[in-house]
Amino acid sequence: MSSRTVIRGGLVITASDEIHADVLIEDGRIAALAASGTPAAEAWSAERTIDATGKYVIPGGVDAHTHMELPFGGTFASDTFETGTRAAAWGGTTTIVDFAVQSVGHSLREGLDAWHAKAEGNCAIDYGFHMIVSDVNQDTLKEMDLLVEEGVTSFKQFMAYPGVFYSDDGQILRAMQRSAENGGLIMMHAENGIAIDVLVEQALARGETDPRYHGEVRKALLEAEATHRAIKLAQVAGAPLYVVHVSAMEAVAELARARDEGLNVFGETCPQYLFLSTDNLAEPDFEGSKYVCSTPLRPKEHQAKLWQGLRTNDLQVVSTDHCPFCFVGQKELGRGDFSKIPNGLPGVENRMDLLHQAVVDGHINRRRWIEIACATPARMFGMYPKKGTIAPGADADVVIYDPHAEQIISAETHHMNVDYSAYEGKRLTGRVETVLSRGELVITEREYTGHAGHGTYTPRSTCQYLT
């Protein structure tokens, strides 16, 4: 049975165009676009018609950095693949790329299989995986080739967290050399974890235990130094590099310099670095623990440089690094010792709305909003044009967005499985109204009509964004 849906009267916005057009969806894919009111559009018939008059019609968001059910610091991220993908859909995101974890002493395959088991049958929207490489050895390097062949085409390494995820420069270089050969993309958590551990130890010895010290020991200069080092290692290996969760202006400068030299170096930032700051980390009564993440929040003056980087394309992607831990019972593990606070913030539901607010505030334009939140992450991680755009042949991942609706972000009304909001009380203009995933209604006029198991695993091709 063929199924057809027509979306009529909206402003279709992609990374490259804005056009008043009707959209025809057939069997889960975009079949055609035609200017609203034209005979071609009027001739379409369908079982379902959605009126988007006065609304935006945009591609579903692609959040290329989430951590559902991630084990960290003796606990687990509080969103499961079921709750996290449902919340993502509420926020207009229709694809996530989560991180499967290789544990030291185990194979990549074991880690990937474990994450498939967590996700399969539980997701409301489509998903893919990156692979965290924690243990670089000859077997791991061979496995990287096999994973690329089956659609896991990106590998994350950590210059931070010694004893957990940390890789030294030699391990990083070997993995980069391998990715240069197999087409994979190395994603780097760029902080000098060895130096940071020294500063943590010294701060605790001085009795500096409050959450705000998390930001003070994880210095911007140590993010910049690691970013510079990662760039140079990638240059030696002849490999592309994607630096995750860039928070410091000094790190942006390193990326800009590398890109000016024509290197395939890319940067991602996150809403928390654009909208929050060390002022939040310093909130009294241990409230600051809610904002502990790594890289950490920076002083407000860094925000202008991040926005500038997004406008000049020295930063290409905004993802969430969604990794929620409840305040009660999880963040509280670090009372009296900031180094024991689980690192991570909730945000998968808020990204599209916060970035629309950035359009309203004049930081970016509407096409750039779609570019950094939908199209470029899809291209960067080998899913375009299946994901990230509205064009014939693309998956019908479509959001009807009301640019005039007003909302106040609150833990009372959000759908993430966490007991606080990082943006509590923030007023926004713009809100998701209806969401389709491969042509199926997941959110229908602000009601959840999706179901666990609709989302399917999406194998990816290699990076489509290289110069």
Image (tube, helix red, strand yellow):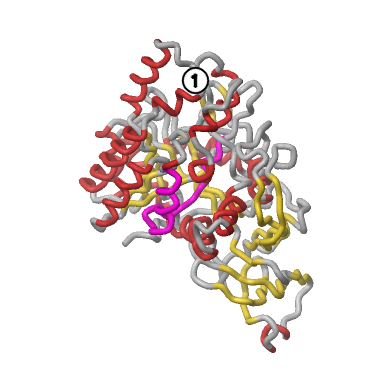
**On-image quarter of the C terminus:** bottom left
Q: Where does the image place residue 247, in percent across and percent down from the top left?
A: 42, 41
- The span picked out in magenta is 302-323
Vertical placement of 39 versus 393: above or below?
A: below
Q: Residue at x 49, y 70 (%)?
A: 16
Q: Where does the image place residue 99, in percent across and percent down from the top left?
A: 49, 40
Which of the 4 image quarters holds residue 218? top left
Which of the 4 image quarters holds residue 438? bottom right
Does the stretch in magenta take in 149? no
Q: Is residue 135 visible?
A: no
Vertical placement of 45 versus 221: above or below?
A: below
Does the stretch in magenta take in 316? yes
Residue hosting label 1: 338
Q: Where does the image place residue 131, in percent across and percent down from the top left?
A: 44, 41
For this orientation, the residue located farthest to the bottom is: 39
Mark 1 Cα shell of 10 Å, populated few (<14), some (14-19), many (≥20):
many
Residue type (three-letter) at the residue carrying disc 1: Phe
